[in-house]
Image: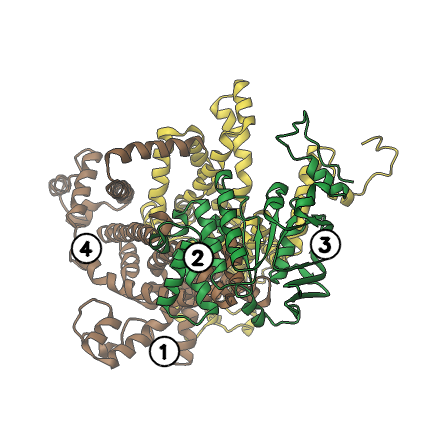
Amino acid sequence: MTNLLEVENLTVKFPTRSGMFEAVRNISFSLGRERLGIVGESGSGKSITGRSILRLIRHPGILEAKRIALEGEDLLTKSEREMRKIRGHKISMVMQDPKFSLNPVMRIGDQICEAYRLHAKASKAEAREKTIKMLEAVLIRDPERVFNAYPHEMSGGMGQRIMIAMMLIPDPQILIADEPTSALDVTVQKEVLEIMDKLVRERGMGLIFISHDLNVVSAFCDRVLIMYAGRIVETCQADKLHEAKHPYTRGLLNSLPQLEHPVDRLAVLQRD
Amino acid sequence: MALTTDQEQRKRRRKSSFSPWIMGFGRVAFTVAITMIGLLFITFIIGRVMPIDPVLSIVGESASKSTYDEAYRQLGLDKPIIVQFFIFLWDVVRGDFGESLLTARPVLDDLIRVFPATLELATVGTIIGVGLGVPLGVIAAVKQGTWIDHIARVVALIGYSMPVFWIGLIGLLVFYGKLGWISGPGRLDIFYVDIIPTVTGMILIDSLLAGDTSVFWNAVSHIILPAGLLAYYSLAYISRMTRSFMLEQLDQEYITTARVKGLSEHAVVWRHALGNVKVPLITVIALSYAGLLEGSVLTETIFSWPGIGLYITTALLSADMNAVLGGTVVVGLVFVCLNIFSDLLYKFFDPRAK
Amino acid sequence: MSDISDHKKPSLREWLTSDAPTSRRQAKFSAYYRSWLALRSNPMAMFGLLILLFLLAIAAFAPIISPHDPFAQDLALRLSAPGENNYILGSDSLGRDILSRLIYGSRITLYIVALVALMAPIVGLFVGTAAGYLGGWVDVVLMRITDIFLAFPRLVLALAFVSALGAGIENAVLAIVLTAWPPYARIARAETLTIRNADYIHAIKLQGAGALRVITKHIWPLCISSLVIRVTLDMAGIILTAAGLGFLGLGAQPPSPEWGAMISAGRQFILDHWWVATMPGLAIFTVSLAFNLLGDGLRDVLDPKKSGK
């Protein structure tokens, strides 16, 4: 089985006043038609890893890698124009907070149609029909109304479902979900995740799930990468996470509260 | 913080009895009324502290004491100042600003006659200024830190620093005096005056309505320099504001979303980012438009442009107080109206404001 | 910090750039020094500063450096072109040396700018802090008044004021101040509202400080920096307004060598004797450009959010 995505020796650097800051340091991983979790604290480089795959690193950042290959095709050798055909069409990304990631002055329907028509030759009417279907697929009850609504009229959970619909409508092969539920109420987190999970599995896509939440990741992913300070410190099967050996992973696990084994004092990570 | 919650509570309480639309309209109307009265009050005070004796200017230096006193009473100057203010207020509401000493006609008639000239100049200036300033600001923001950005900054700073009455003179000297590319001061050459019927009072429009292209092109050759100068000033301001709004928007997460979708940089910048900048930009454009209407005082003086600015300054220099006060009130009125208008537009364009 | 006296005394530069200031004074100076370093790396701002220093020097040494008496007329040599008859920048319609008049005129410009830049922010500070701190109806009334002044077009209002008060430099200054204070009041009020509920203000009030003491000792000092930025940015506007009033004959009166009035005097000769109106205009332009360059740089340094960096 060839992998959907292969990343080899990826490094992302940012020039700062006190020299180069390496946000991601020489990491390699691969993704099949599976759900891969990337876990780490904030600042561990996990979000930047996600964005590097799309080659969307902000201006002063420098991306270096031996290879980032999508189905064997190296993305690094592609021109910006070719890259735009990959983005959305082959690889998509759902971001943290729908409050900020949806354009506030554009109707929701227009935003989704735009994503669809960019990669599929379709008339306005077709795009509209497809958009309504997609909104139904993410379990939005009144898609006609939502189509004409603006983002600020939506709740966070609705917003994130719209975001998922928008990112999945061009039928990409890989979805990167960058903390897709961290900004949502706990009550709707699970709902949104289940919708996303269902769609990804139905379409046989690869999912990269970036999160700081070990519980969520182990529940929704097949495989987990643990990142710390820009490096992957451990890779393991999600259901074997509790057997992880690396001291950092152990530290993370120990700092989680557990209902079955209450402790007086949660462990604090020791970083040295 | 305490203040905002307090205000919100008060608003909510009010909303329970009124529909929000009427409430909003009522609040705007109240604010406008207060501002207007204040504006008139200041104008009134200025009129009162004037070193010019309004009685003398009517009865003349040689009038007898009894004639003087008679006129004094007729003007209502014996009444308490607050009563005088209300009389003044009432006059203004009826559109009665008195008669101009200079033209011996009602000031209101004069103002109606001269205002279209100012409006025409400021409108052409704003259209050019926005047409060039917005793209310049957008490009400067997108190319932040490059030479294009620096040039845009220098262009704007030069605009901020140039005395309009001076650059106007130099412009006349070079393009009219030396090169002869354009026509000189005024709105039309003398033999084009009064050929076409006055409809809007704006010659560019009236000449097109009358189908007379020779008048139109003559008017263009007259307006191009003053309007171009005003356009430069509005370009300076609008391009700077556009740049800073754009920088703010380009940093937002929805821009990343647009890129993730695979949109071209062109669509990201001009459709998504500028779409969001449009909203605050309306206020800026309205402000700059109002500024041009006002800034025309000096421009009109230089170009002998028979608009409201020239009217006020001429009146000032000949101590024609009714004309000065009338003109000031009208310019203030236009200012306030433009502000309200831009607020309404803002609400119209920003889906979040509804 | 153990015994410092053991070590070599740090150089001034080290003291200023220290990451661990040992006193409030050091922290303050080091903040100033960092701002200065940032400003110094901005060539356009430094260029502006240089011009202004140059202007200050010219104004200070006007009697020494001006080649002629700015008021001395020589009708025989009137309207000499630049370079002719020993007049470097030419002479005006009364045969006065334009360069000398420009040099003396710099004093008037600086005088007007200094007065307005002192008075307008102070009026604004009074109004804004009082409105912000006292709140309630005081706030409503003061802010309404501010809005009314803001609603007025500035130049027209200044024109009306000057014509009411009579033409002259002092009255022009007064008129500009009367039209320039509202934005400062807005800024001061906004600052006051954010400071007003800070814990340390509550602490001072608990110690028995009255409104006057809180405002003058604790709120004013914190409003100053944002006012200073705004004033620097407004300087050019002040110069242009003052020159505009002078141009209309409502500012400095003849024979005073005010730059705006000089342009006005040269206006009728513009087609044949361009230098009479051009030279003072260049002077106004240079000085206001200098203020704008400096103000722009200062804002980048002191208000990084607005500059978008």
Residue that mark 3 sits on: A22
Q: Is residue A47 above or below residue C209?
A: below
Q: Residue B277 has which mark?
A: 2
Q: Residue at x 30, y 59 (%)?
A: B309
Asked if one can make out residue C96 in the rendered structure from this viewpoint, the answer is no
- Residue type beneath disc 2: Val
Q: Which residue is mark 4?
A: B107
Mark 2 or 1: in front is: 2
Query: Residue beneath label 1, please?
Result: B182
The percent coordinates of residue C57 (x first, y second) are 62, 54
Q: Residue at x 46, y 38 (%)?
A: C190
The residue marked by circle 2 belongs to what chain? B
Give the amino acid type for the residue marked by disc 4 in the picture: Val
Dot 4 crowding, Cα within 10 Å, few <14, some 14–19, many 20+: many
Colour style of the rendered protein structure: by chain
Spot the yellow chain and give its letter.
Answer: C
In contact (CB < 8 Å): disc 1 and disc 4: no
Chain B color in figure? brown
A263 and A158: which one is in front?
A263
| Quadrant position of residue B51 | top left
Label 3 – label 1 distance at C-alpha = 61 Å
Q: Colour of chain A?
A: green
Residue B109 in the image, given as x and y percentages of width and height: 17, 58
- Mark 1 and mark 2 in contact (Cβ < 8 Å)? no
